[in-house]
Image: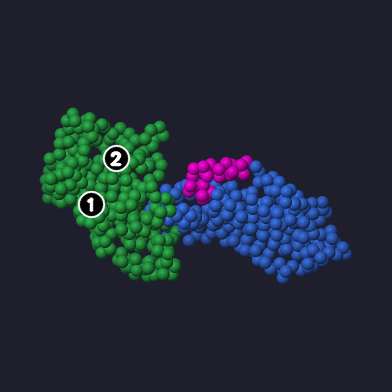
Amino acid sequence: MTGAPLIEVEDLRIDLDDGSRRVAAAEGISFRISRGETFGLVGESGCGKSITALALIGLLRPPLSIGGGVIRFEGREIQHLSAAKQRDLRGNRIAMIFQEPMTALNPVSPVGRQIAEMFVLHKGKSWREANQLAVEALASVRVPAPERRVNDYPHQLSGGMRQRVMIAIALACGPDLLIADEPTTALDVTVQAEIIELMRNLCAERGTAILMISHDLGLVANVCRRVAVMYAGRIVEERGSADIFRTPSHPYTQGLVASLPRLGSRAALGRTRLKEIAGVVPAITSFPDGCRFNPRCAHATDICRTVVPETDLLEAGGLVRCHHHA
Amino acid sequence: MKLRANLIIGGALFALAILVGLLAPWLAHTDPVMDANLLNAEEPPSWTWWFGTDDQGRDIYSRVVYGARVSLTVGIISQLINSIIGVALGLSAGYWGGWWDDVVNALTNLMLAIPSLIFALAIMAVLGPGLTSLLIALGLTNWSFTCRIARASALSLRSQGYVQAATVLGYGDLRIMMTQLLPNMLGPIVVIGTLGMGSAVLSEAALSFLGLGVRPPFPSWGSMLSEAREQITTAPWLSVFPGLAIFLTVLGLNLLGDGLRDILDPQSRSRRA
């Protein structure tokens, strides 16, 4: 790990209040991201990765709430900051881009104005200056003819262009951390690659750290230096992204890696079935005791069904939460 | 694009009413209040007296022309007050929810339960007759529909991606309401507003008819109708022309509202795009 952590999450617990009781939608979440680092959070739908991101920017809304743990941004605890101070952090120091570029832009406002608003809001610029900066911001995300495009409305742009605009808005104020929640899921594969490339280059140029959230292990490992895999509200493994493919340690990660189709492999040619992980993700209200993966795990023993595994340090570097890890 | 007859006719009628009100001093043949002359009392419509004269010999045409000022002032300003109150309450209630939403809902239900004209009458009774109290009374009693629409729109817009994105980007509540929610709900609000203007013109007529609006001898369409009541068999033109003016203005506003709904509907907008 290089340098002091930019953001540090320690034993974060997110509660879901369903009226009668509180259940932990995510717990024991710990990770740190250094300045300029790229970190990925991978997991299936409902594993708690998106709510973890929302917790970081202080946007959990009932029935969800932070049940415990600490979030530090530049060494300062931010989970109890006042609404105004959190607002000042959002967009300015921590920015976020979303999955759906179709709906994440205001349909009745020209895109240039939406970018310019960030400079007015967080940097106290006049609208005149801000509009000028918006053109530059659009140019930086390689939108052609930016001085004309600023006047376009979102519906006049393609999906890829809209996501470029979203990136321009998110990076407008030069944030220290960019949270990208499934940033390319709604896009064509070719556009996906361009957007990822653009995001990575811009962030590298500006020293912006990326927290990328996706269900796509391949994509995340491609973008990020380190990857954490989440399962049913817990981080089960955290590794360098090359290691996670070579020597996955947690049975769930092993299953994930095995179930990726590979070009040229027998499965991809249709001669054998693609590997899958047996069973389904447990519902949030009925998480099993012990290791939450135990009902689907081939190596599960009695201890897995009763005792929650601790996070162990791996010799090869990285963390794993399993009783029987290799 | 198909011809939008309702928009054009409605807009033309409303524009005509506004023009007549603005240009009243030039359009009127005589002073609507002072030029009474008993020698030509109750003249039927003719080339000299286009709309006839009343029992005091005043030119009905001139009085109808000046009456447009009162009706339109009341219609536009009171509906503006209604729209502002309705949007402010409905938007904030829908966006914030919680106890504030409950309070606004209770207030809206209360307003819907009491007939607005009765409520306006009560306010007029306290404030006394006159143009200002008319504006206040009508401006405070007709915001419930706007409020309902604004609240419903805010509720559905609140969960839109761009509103959440704005929160993430550090927008404050007020900024989100003004830049993200309001522009996106403006269509229905404008439509309700034009329809409301029509009903405000009618309410003004009703209140003036009851003697609570603009006081005679100054002309308003409602008070003219009220005065004409007793001569409706002997001098029907006294009630026909102010009635026609009310009818055409309200018709124009309703057609305009309909037409605006057609072009402001997001679905028809995306069809054009």
Q: Is residue A275 left or right of residue B143?
A: left
What span is in magenta?
Answer: B90-113
- Chain the render paints green: A
Residue drawn at the location 36% of the way across and 60% of the way down:
A169
Disc number for residue A27: 2
Identity, as a three-letter code, of the amino acid under mark 2 = Glu
Report if residue B59 lies within the magenta region.
Answer: no
Q: Position of residue A258 (x, y in %)?
A: 16, 43
Disc number for residue A198: none
Q: Position of residue B208 (x, y in %)?
A: 74, 53
Q: Colour of chain B?
A: blue
The reply to whether the C-beta atoms of the residues labelled 2 and 1 are less than 8 Å apart is no
Say above or below: B12 vs A321.
Answer: below
Residue drawn at the location 32% of the way across and 45% of the way down:
A70
Mark 2 or 1: in front is 2
Q: Is residue A280 left or right of residue A248?
A: right
Label 2, label 1: how far apart the Cα atoms are:
22 Å
> Which subunit holds the residue at mark 1?
A
Residue A297 in sight = yes
Q: Position of residue A242 (x, y in %)?
A: 15, 51
- Which residue is label 1 attached to? A220
Identity, as a three-letter code, of the amino acid under mark 1 = Val
Residue drawn at the location 26% of the way across and 61% of the way down:
A207
> Which subunit holds the residue at mark 2?
A
